[in-house]
Amino acid sequence: MCGIAGAASAEPGVKQDVASIRLMCKAIIHRGPDDEGFYVREGVGLGMRRLSIIDLAGGHQPIHNEDQTIWAVFNGEIYNFPELRRELESRGHLFYTHSDTEVIIHLYEELGSGCVNKLRGMFAIAIWDEQRKSLLLARDRLGKKPLHYAFEKGQLLFGSEIKSLLAVAPELAEVDRQAMLSYFQFGYIPDPLTAFRSIRKLPPGHVLEFQSGEIRVSRYWDLPKYGSFDPGSENECLDELESRLEEAVRIRLISDVPLGALLSGGVDSSIVVALMARASSATVRTFSIGFPNQDFSETEYARAVAERFDTDHTEMIVDPDFGETLDKLTRLLEEPFADSSILPTFHVSRLARQHVTVALSGDGGDELYAGYDRYQINLLRSRFERLPAWMGRAYREHLYPRLPRNLRGRQFAYNISLRTRDRYIDSISYLTPDLRDRFLFSNDFLEFAATCPSPAEQFRAYYDEAPANDALSRMQYLDTKTYLTADVLTKVDRMSMAASLEVRCPLLDQEFVKWSVSLAPRWKLHMGQSKYALKKLAERLGVPARAIHRPKQGFAVPLVHWFRKELKSGIGEILLEPRSLNRGYFNPVGIRALLEEHWKGRRDNSGVLWIMLIFELWHRNYLESFRSADSVRAIDSTSPALVLGESTPSRRSMQTGDGTS
C-alpha cells in the first residue's frame, strides 16, 4: 500500500521540478513510511510513498518497461498478477521485478487504457507514456483507493490525497459551496466533487487520459444487471456463495508482513474471520474495540466469534479524550466528513497496527446483501403511495412549513408523502436548504442554494439509471455508487492509512460483487430478514448464533448521549461562537432551536449536530491551519530520495519487486 502523486505538463518541453514532486509526496508520508521514489523528466513528474507489504527488500517504484518508455506509480493490490505475468511472459514480455506494478506496465503496452479491465484488485494508477507524451490515471471499480486531480497553470496535478495538490498549489484551497450542499445533505461529498472548486475526484471505475493539454474522463466498468440469477435451491446458493467468498478471502492472505482481521462481531466480519481461520495454517489475529456504554459496544459478540475460531484476539475499550481525538481527525480529513464511525475505525486501526501491517475487514456486505434497515423501512412505506401525489405535494408545500417543529409525526408525514425514489433519498438526507430545513440556514446561503442544482439530482439519476427492475436493487445500486464509495471506503482508507495499516475487503472483490449483484432479491431480503444468504452462510460456518441473530448495530458511537451530557456545553459554545456564525452558512436561531430539542430529549438531533460540528472543526483544524502554515509547505532537503530519470541507469538486472504496494 502506498500513496502516489505527480504532475504532467500541457505544453511540450516543460521540465517538472523534482522538489515539487517530492513535496507532494511528503504531504502523504503517512500512507507510505517505508520508501519513496520519483521519476522526473520533460513533461512529467511521478512520485510515490511506499508501505512495504510484499518483497520487502525490493519494490521500489516507479516501475518501467524494457526500453524505459513507459513508467508507472501504483497504489493498491492486484491479486491476479501472477496469472497475468505468466500470460505476458508467454507473449515475449521481459520482467526485471517480481511486482504487480510491472504487470500493469506490460498490460498497458498491449492494451493501452484497456489494461485496467484485466486487473483484479484495488488500485489507483498513474502511467506515463513517453512516446505518446500522455498520462493515464485509473481508479479501481468500487473506489477502494482514492485519486484526485486538478488542472492548474498548464499542468495536471494528481494525488492519492488532496494534501498533495495543495502542497504545491495552495491557491486551490477555495471552498466549493456547492459541494457543501452535498455535505450538509448526505454527510459526505460524493464524487466527482471535492470540498474545493478546482479539485476533482476521479470516480470509481473510470480512467483519465491527459494528452496535449486535453483531459478525457471515461468509464470502463459499472455494476452488472441486478437479480438476473436465481439459484434453484438454498444449498446451491450457499455452496456457490461459500466457494466464491472463500476464494476472495484466500487471495487476500498473501503477505510478507503480519496479517490479521478487524472483527466487529457482526455477520460480515465474522464470516471473513471464519474463512481466514479455515484457509490459514497459523492462528488468525483479530482486533476489536468497544465503548464503556454497552449500548454502543459489540465486544461481547466479537469475543464470542474469536473464541469460536480460536483466534489470537486483542480488544480495547475506548474511552477517548473526545476533544483531542476529534481535533486530530479533523486535521487529517481533507473534507468535512460526518460519519461518526471514523472514531472507532481510527482506534481499531491504530490497535491493529501495533501488531500487524495488513488487516481484512467485512466492509461491503450491507450494500451487497441489503443489510441496512432503511431498505426495509422504505419498502414498507410504499403502501402510502396509494395516496394521490397531489395530496403529498400539498402537505409538503403548504401544511408542513406551518406545523410546529416539535409536533410528533411531522417529519414522518413529510417522508411518506414522497414516492419511492425520493422517499429513500429523503431518508438518507440530513440537512436540505429547502422546505424541510430552511430554518437552520442563513438567508445568504439559502439564496445561494436556490441558484444551484439540488445534490439529490445526482442520486435520482443513479436510482433511475440502475440496471435493476425492483426498488430494493435500485436502492442498493444507489448506495454502492455513493455511500459505499464516498463514505464507507473513504473512512476505511483515511483512518487505516493514518495508522499506516493496509485494509483488504474480500466482500468487495470484483468477481464476488458481480455474482452477488446478480442474485435475485429474495436471497438478500427474505421474509423481513436482511442479509439472508450471508446469515445462512454464517450458520453453516459455525458463527455463534448470538452474533448472527441480533439487531443491527453498526460501528456506532454514543453521540446522542455525548451531546446531552459530557459534550453538552462544548457543542453549543462551538456552534454559536461568532467565529462559526460568521462563515455565513447557518442561522443562530435555528441552531439554538436544534440544540434545545436535543437537550430536552424531544428529538434525537445528534446526527445533524455532528454534521455541523465536523463542518466547523474542519474549517478550524484543516482549512485555517493550512492557510496559515506556510512553513508546512517548506521543502525538507535533508531527506534522501530515489529520483529516476534520464540519468538513472536501468534496474533491469536487479531482482526486486514491489509485490503489492
Image (tube, rainbow, N blue to C red):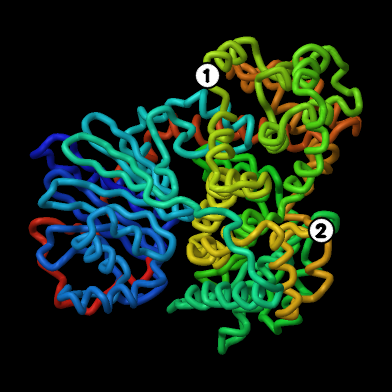
Left or right: 109 with respect to 84?
left
| Crowdedness near tag 1: few (<14), some (14–19) or many (≥20) residues, C-alpha within 10 Å | few
Q: Residue at x 44, y 48 (%)?
A: 204
Q: Earlier in the sequence, mark 1 or mark 2?
A: 1
Position of residue 342 measured from the top left corner of the image (x, y, whole percent): 63, 50
**Distance of label 1 from label 2 (alpha carbons):** 42 Å
- Find residue 321 and name its label: none
Position of residue 282 measured from the top left corner of the image (x, y, whole percent): 57, 87
In front: label 1 or label 2: 2
Give residue 313's quadrant in the image: bottom right
Left or right: 469 with respect to 67?
right
User: Which of the pair 375/159 is nearer the observer?
Assistant: 375
| Crowdedness near tag 2: few (<14), some (14–19) or many (≥20) residues, C-alpha within 10 Å | few
Q: Amino acid at mark 1?
A: Cys
Position of residue 525 measured from the top left corner of the image (x, y, whole percent): 74, 57
Is residue 27 something one can see in this rendering?
A: no
Is residue 165 something one can see in this rendering?
A: yes
Give residue 31's quadrant in the image: bottom left
- Residue named by callout 2: 527
Q: Residue at x 80, y 19 (%)?
A: 391
User: Which of the pair 139/328 is nearer the observer?
Assistant: 139
